[in-house]
Image (cartoon, grey):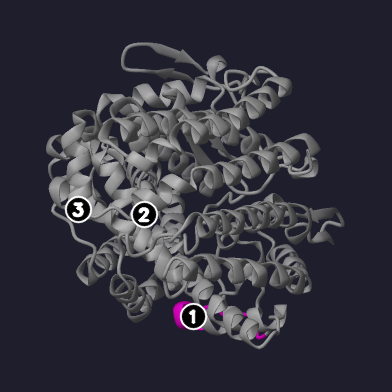
Amino acid sequence: MINKLPGVEFMGQNKKLNSDEVTTEWNDSYLFSSRGDALEKLASLSKRSEEINGDFRPEFERLSGSILLGYLEAEKEFSRSIDVLYIYAYTQLSKNVNDRFFNSLLKEVQDLVTEHRKASAFATVKLTSLNKEEWDRLFSEESGLGIYQAYLEANYMRFIEHRPVNEAQAVYLAEIENQRMKLETEALSRITNEVTMAGNITLENGEEFQVNSQSYNTLLSVDQSRENRKRCYDKRFYHLINESDSMASLYFEKARLDDLAAKELNYEDSYESSLYYLYLTKKQVSDMNKVFKELKNVFEDYNEFRRKKLGLKKLRPYDLALQLTDEPGKNYIYTDALQEVRESYSGMDPRFNEIFLKMVTGNFIDVYPDPEHGKQPGGYCYGLCALKSPALIFMNYNGIISDQKTLTHELGHGINYYLMGSSVDYLYCSGQIYEMEVPSTFNEELLVDYIIENSDRETAVAVLAQHIGEYQNYFTRQPMISEFEYKAHQLCAERNSRDKTVSGAELNALWTNLSREYRSESVEYYTEDSAEWTYINHIYLTNNYYTFNYAISKAITLALFKQYKEKPETFNKNYIAYISVGSTMLPEEKLKKYFGIEINRQLFEDSMDVVKLRIQELTNLEKTE
């Protein structure tokens, strides 16, 4: 069913789009027309996995260039199909984490992925053991392998020191990965059904108010009653503490499996493994953390601005999200938000607008929250490069300023995926996490600049203030979350070595002590240890240490935005190339080739200089009559 909205008309570059064409719910029938079709595909893929094993296992005993090319082509088609099936199961389960069919389907797809990893273990072992001379022979035998050289380098050749030594170990690792995937699914279900469902409070007007993942963020953003905000904040603050033992038990098992898998592949731990996959070094991340801790006082002028604007003696945690407008409860209609996002692309390559129109009118965005019926909190974007189709975007749009930013953030991912899918082979439609976050965070800068330049002073102040608050989130909270993961993993490993577990209280204390290194002293936080870590989806992902990538991407984005403002035509040419090329190039090579940027201490220091300029811009806006 297509949900239509009233609103404005949009003027595309070559066509007019009436807001009646804007869609707000997914229609994924192009993935599978029915649940039965999805089950049929699952069965056929299981059979296909067996066929690939039967066809290529004996051939790998006398591996040649042509055999390897045939295997890669077969694996690519299998991967395309499993990708579509996984996305179908995951996205539909996001709509209702309690849907038994999609819960079961996702688990079965995860099991199939595991079984296929086992079935293809012979290839993984063989291809990660080849030396340079053997690779040179294969490439010389089959010219068709040339297009896959970067893929083979990234997925096999560079892992010769971190490889399974035999099939038995590869099978064992696949089983561990399956357990990790299941824990991730369980964690997201618990977060939706329990951790973020804090119960009811009574507002000052006597109204009963249910505190869940969506209502919590909305109330703290729009309710001018400080007492209401405090009641809402307190309800969840203490509820999270009550949930911490349960989530600590789950996290303890996750950390154990993370490090077990890493050590099997000759890494010190899962942190070293994650950095290796990201092509980053410990020094780069350590320098980043040091810079953001050393320069956290840059945000004190902003916090003082917020305190004065709200007329408070001291900021408390429940004062940090309130929109700084005369009408903080103002709702930003979805179609209006789309209009502003589209117009923020006016200085970008025309393909931005073309892709935008495809996504917002084609049932590719699921817009509104529905926590009462099991819709998962948060937002994400899943690329459909396997189908050369626009991406699927998941949102919980409530009409507050931060929702506008989330919208343009996810659309940035969508543009990136679509350009890659249209430009490079499916196997290259990926990138490192921080690379993939650059288009989304760059989109945020475009939107904020557009609003500042084209809105009344009050709106400009509110949006810029919210944006600087997000800088504080990107450059302090997100690195802190990853550092928490690292230290929590260390604590779990130490306890596991003594056959003990970790309690919620211990992880709460770890979170609180670490947050003191990053957070502002101008905010009066609670004396009790916080259990905020319990509801952060990212720390339960199989993709460990995800969140520090947000800080790296934002630092890169601010450097790119400076280039965009200085030479827009040159920048656009380079930027389109950068976000289209996927993983055909190494991440550091791409940054140097297109923008002359390196990830180092200077990049992070420069990003904080931009923050200072934005804070000064906010102060100047406030003074403008």
The x, y position of residue 193, in whole percent, is 78, 53
Judging depth in this view, the residue of 480 and 502 nearest the camera is 502
Q: Earlier in the sequence, mark 3 or mark 2?
A: 3
C-alpha separation, residue under disc 1 versus residue under disc 2 = 30 Å
Q: Marks 1 and 3: in contact by CB < 8 Å?
A: no
Q: Is residue 182 above or below residue 55?
A: below
Q: Amino acid at mark 1?
A: Ser
Would you say 179 lies left or right of 314 here? right
Q: Earlier in the sequence, mark 1 or mark 2?
A: 2
In the rendering, which numbered label is found on residue 434?
2
Total label count?
3
Range of magenta residues: 515-527
Provide the residue designation for mark 3. Answer: 132
The x, y position of residue 148, in whole percent, is 27, 36
C-alpha separation, residue under disc 3 versus residue under disc 1 = 57 Å
Q: Main secondary structure of the magenta part?
A: loop
Provide the residue designation for mark 1. Answer: 522
**Position of the N terminus by quadrant:** top right
Between tags 3 and 1, which lies in front? 3
Q: Marks 2 and 3: in contact by CB < 8 Å?
A: no
**Pointer 3: residues within 10 angstroms few (<14), some, or many (20+)?**
few
Q: Is any atom of residue 84 visible in this view?
A: yes
The x, y position of residue 309, in whole percent, is 49, 65
**Pointer 2: residues within 10 angstroms few (<14), some, or many (20+)?**
many
Which element carries disc 3, helix, strand or loop? helix
